[in-house]
Amino acid sequence: MTARAADRARYDRATAHLDAPLAIVDLDAFDANAADLVRRAAGKPVRVASKSVRCRALLERVLAMDGFQGIMSFTLAESLWLARSGFDDVLLAYPSADRSGFAELAADPKLAGAVTVMVDDPAHLDLIDAARDGGREVVRVCLELDTSLKLLGGRVRVGARRSPLHSPAQLTELARSVARRPGFRLVGIMAYEGHIAGVGDAVAGRPLRSRAIRLMQATARRELAERRAAVVRAVREVVPGLEFVNGGGTGSVQHTAAEDSVTEIAAGSGLYVPRLFDNYTSFTGRPAALFAQPVVRRPGVGVVTVLGGGYPASGAAGPDRLPVPYLPEGLQYDPQEGPGEVQTPLLGSPADDLLIGDKVWFRHAKAGELCERFAALHLVEGDEVTATVPTYRGEGQTFL
């Protein structure tokens, strides 16, 4: 029996009393992935990206482990909810225009002490001030550095279009604006190198593309390390008491941790290890989060149909954004239909061994987005479900 077949047998036994559709997290794999992130961070604390987890119980679990500290959130509403729930170190990774949220933040000392917001433009400070509605609490602020690699005098750009702040001079200018402005305190710098951390460099069947990606990433790492160090030196001249410099992402943990200017690492997808994180030379994780769909039809030889399953991930549309049939091994989509909203035909010889009501296990493409489809995660240890915990959706929270 292969390791994957053994996993299928475990998951089927653990969930035999549960009807699909359902989602699970294999806690042995989850904990092993967490330990690997800590190992790769080499002594620097790992801040957990909540958008990749979207389950309070699992956020609590990982933050109770040595080596993890703080949350990186994705909306202001989520940040405030987490802070009210007892999480006391929440870094909002994206700018917000949530005026009512800023009014709450500025009026509540507990929230203002727990949440740090992201800015990359003086207009963000203006919006926060206009939203205060009498609130006088000091708002903790983080600046975001644009990590993109610019070549040929800026005519070629590699990396996500995030912050407009690229140079030490640009970040220093905004740091001075924050420092001069009453009601704000600059506490950190963040830089997410998505073109390094979020792009696999060992694409199956694409050796030339993989080599080109590795070359690009090596060049980008060198350029960013030098520029990030210069940014941190310049901003610390304005704000000597800077609390943290955050960088990284699951695919670049050990590289970013090696930079002296970085004080903490961000990671989240490496806990669940969805399919987009299979193609890396820097680490190998264990799939920890899966979902099961029930067989509801047997249209013919070598074909079964499961209920639903069409859960595409965000990003540029393509086959890599789709979930994949994982267990039993050997199933594939009908190329004329793909994964459907209500039904999904699957082709392959393993279909002939599946009965109505059997489970087919899938892996999704991007980590936390699975939790927008399910109200609960069943936590599996060995061949038992030892707990069932709500996702954000299960707690009635849909932040985006």
Image (spheres, rainbow, N blue to C red):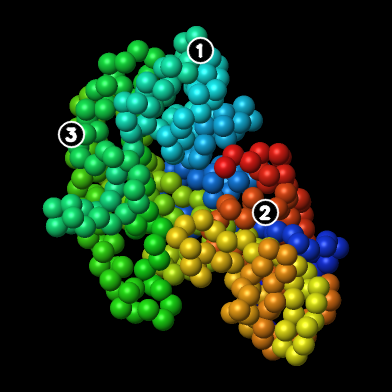
Residue placed under numbered mark 1 in the picture: 133
Describe residue 266's horizontal placement relative to residue 179 as left or right: right
The answer to whether one can see residue 110 in this image is no
Estimate the spatial distance between the alpha carbons at disc 2 and disc 1, rounded to whole Å.
36 Å
Residue placed under numbered mark 3 in the picture: 169
Residue in the image at 64% along x and 30% along y: 85
Q: Secondary structure at mark 1?
A: loop
Residue in the image at 48% along x and 67% along y: 318
Residue in the image at 66% along x and 67% along y: 340
Residue placed under numbered mark 2 in the picture: 373
Task: Give above or below for 216 relative to 377.
Answer: below
Q: Secondary structure at mark 2?
A: loop
Q: Which amino acid type corresponds to the residue marked 1 in the rendered image?
A: Asp
Neighbour tally class for label 2: few under 14, some 14-19, many 20 plus, Cα within 10 Å:
some
Mark 2 or mark 1: whose residue is earlier in sequence: 1
Neighbour tally class for label 3: few under 14, some 14-19, many 20 plus, Cα within 10 Å:
some
Q: Secondary structure at mark 3?
A: helix
Mark 2 or mark 3: whose residue is earlier in sequence: 3
